[in-house]
Image (cartoon, coloured by chain):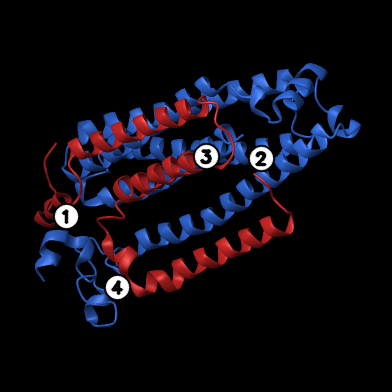
Chain colours: A blue, B red
Amino acid sequence: MADAAVLGDENVAGENSTNDHTADDHATDEHGAHYTSLGISNMKLSMWLFLGSECLLFGALISTYLLSKTRFLTELIAGNPNVVSTLPSALAEEMIHEGSVEPLFDIPFTSASSFILLMSSLTMVLAHKAVSEGNYKNTRLFLAATALLGSFFIAGQVYEFTAFYREGLTFDGNLFGSAFYTLTGFHGIHVSVGILMLVALLILSMKGKLQADRAETVELVGLYWHFVDIVWVLIFTIVYLVR
Amino acid sequence: MTDIATTDDHAHDAHHPTERQYWLVFLALVIVTAAEVAWSYAGIDGLAYLLPLFAMMLFKFVLVAGVFMHLYFDSKVLNGKTFWMVFGSGLVIAMLVFAAVFGTFEFEI
């Protein structure tokens, strides 16, 4: 019971054992939010289940990328004319010489993008903390900062895609291009959706409709945002740093 | 603006990390990312290159999921039997499926 007092309203029902299905398992707080035996609200549990399905999506995309890159490089290094002809000769020669797709990437630039996204995760948790404490000025500040940093990341991705396209890597040119643009593009779409959600929260806050009693709404958007950040942590290492 | 957060809200926040802890986690993430990039320029190949790289990636993954996503603090999400039945079993099956796919395609790093 002491734990319940410490954990607060999110764990009103959750302080009971998961095997003890009492009336508390279906408890609600003063705002009508339903809580599960896991000690989190139904909304939060739903978000976690959604993120679980997103793991499968990105897991499939990352697997496809790795398989496609390996197949592409094998054929490129073997000198398959159907693959070599899909790239400008200078880029193809450089990739064959290096035995990897590394010559295409601008690691310092992508590192800066990673820093921006990590920074946005920090501002996101600070926004949640601010709204929980009833500090609405800081809530708006951090929500706006998160959206802005996300926009910078997207701008960087657009720049990167444009640069790759000019270097000769097209979406439909070869297996590697298709897998790369699909994976990073899907991630970019997720970031864009996150920005829209942040802007919606910002508008709600400006209208005075995002008070401390609705802090969980900010936390749910935060979960999505941090998930997108985690996916980028994986993409940055697997796509850009693994040779 | 009035502070309308309830006592329970504040008690709940007391269980979450402080602002300083969030900054420290962010700092750790930046340092590890910088270490990853520096490592990529070290000129090492093969498993000796990949294992530390994946260890750093996993470290960042755990930090973000544990602290920023509050998994350390919503402990019942991790400890509950229902969680492992619904999410954990799916995760294990998914990993096995991906392993089978990699095996089928004779994937090489």
| Residue A233 x %, y % | 47, 39
Label disc, if present, on residue A37 of the rendered structure? 4
Relative depth, front residue between A142 and A68: A68
The quarter holding residue B46 reads: top right
Q: Horizontal placement of A140 versus B51: left or right?
A: left
Tag 4: amino acid: Ser
Q: Amino acid at mark 3?
A: Ala
Q: Which label number is shown at residue B12?
A: 1
- Quote the CA–CA distance across marks 1 and 3: 43 Å
- Circles 4 and 2 on the same subunit: yes
Q: What is the C-alpha distance between the residues marked 2 and 3?
A: 30 Å
**Which structural element holds mark 4?**
loop
**Mark 1 or 3 closer to N-term?**
1
| Of the image marks 4 and 2, the number of the one nearer the N terminus | 4
1 and 3 marks on the same chain: yes
Label 2 Cα neighbours within 10 Å, binned few <14 / some 14-19 / many ≥20: some
Q: CA distance from mark 4 to mark 2?
A: 38 Å
